[in-house]
Amino acid sequence: MPAPDDFRWPDGSRLALSIVVNVEEGAEHNIRDGDKGPEPVDELGAVPKKPMRMHGSESNYLYGIKAGAPRILRILDQHGIEATWTAAALALERAPELAAAIRARGDEVAAHGYRWTHQFWMDEAKEREFITNAADSIERTIGTRPSGWLSRYLHTDNTRRLITEAGFSYHMDDYSDDFPFWDRVETADGQSKPMVILPYAMDSNDMKFWLAPSLTAKDWLDYAVATFDELHAESQEVGARMMSLGLHLRIIGRPGRIGAFRKFLDHVTAQEGVWIACRRKIAQAFAEAVPIGD
């Protein structure tokens, strides 16, 4: 549903901007962790025909932790921006320095699974365990239990119910709008509970650097800025909006790409009427302002 005509974000703005940094590195498929095979090589999509360690590919993931994350943190700090880190819990367990930096900033960590793996093949019991393990791990690592959930794109018919039962307050696996909305989830005891759906976005995601036809840093920046400008204009003329910008440590964190992120933040922070906040705050602001069913 569209935003109410009089809707304003907490600081009076009409546009909310969410910076989402995905942390997956170290939680990907690897026979070291008992998987049947390795993760495909990121920018090549190559997959070996036998189970084996792919040390080169593993080092590409490690680059995201060692070099990409510090660049992203510096730029966020320079602009005074809070972010939501959607983390595969095991990745943060294996990157304590990054976890400490996120804690020090006071940023939100949302759950992106325990491992960076698909859920679509899991039965209900296995998926429940997967969700619980992710939440427990992030609480141990960060000190705060996650309130948002993002799957590795594919999820099951049970996912929304299971995260509701696990205490999550918002769900990101939706691409249907540029503004939050309510959903009702039927729980196992026959109750109907409300859940805030906070839509995410694929088109402005930095994975567009990898997908054919791939974007250059300039192309991606142009697209991200155009997305922001249009939503900013609509928020003033039509009604409140929300924009999501999804990033990955090992993608945007490369030297030839990171400048595009800096320039994007230069642009948006120079505009008025924009509230840049973590997703937990955006979900809370929506829930407080829009009654369930509106």
Image (cartoon, rainbow, N blue to C red):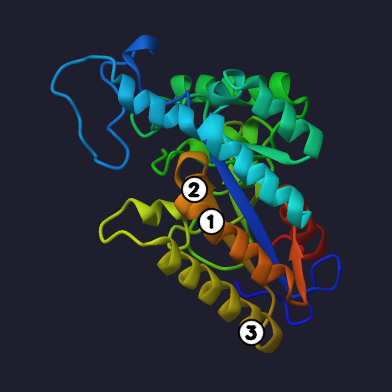
In the drawing, what numbered circle is on residue 69? none
Which secondary structure lies at badge 2?
helix
The one nearer the camera, 285 or 92, is: 92
Which secondary structure lies at badge 3?
helix
The answer to whether 205 appears left or right of 259 in the picture is left
- 2 or 1: mark nearer the eye: 2
Where does the image place residue 57, in percent across and percent down from the top left? 33, 28
Q: Can residue 83 be seen at all in this image of the molecule?
A: no
Residue for point 47% across, 32% down: 63
Please, what is the three-letter code of the amino acid marked with disc 3?
Ala
- The Cα–Cα distance between marks 2 and 3, rounded to whole angstroms, is 32 Å
Please, what is the three-letter code of the amino acid marked with disc 2?
Pro
The answer to whether 203 appears left or right of 21 in the picture is left
In the drawing, what numbered circle is on residue 255? 2
Please, what is the three-letter code of the amino acid marked with disc 1?
Tyr
Q: Which residue is mark 1?
A: 200
Q: Which residue is mark 3?
A: 233
Q: Quadrant of the C terminus?
A: bottom right
Residue for point 60% across, 65% down: 264
Q: Is residue 45 above or below residue 62?
A: below
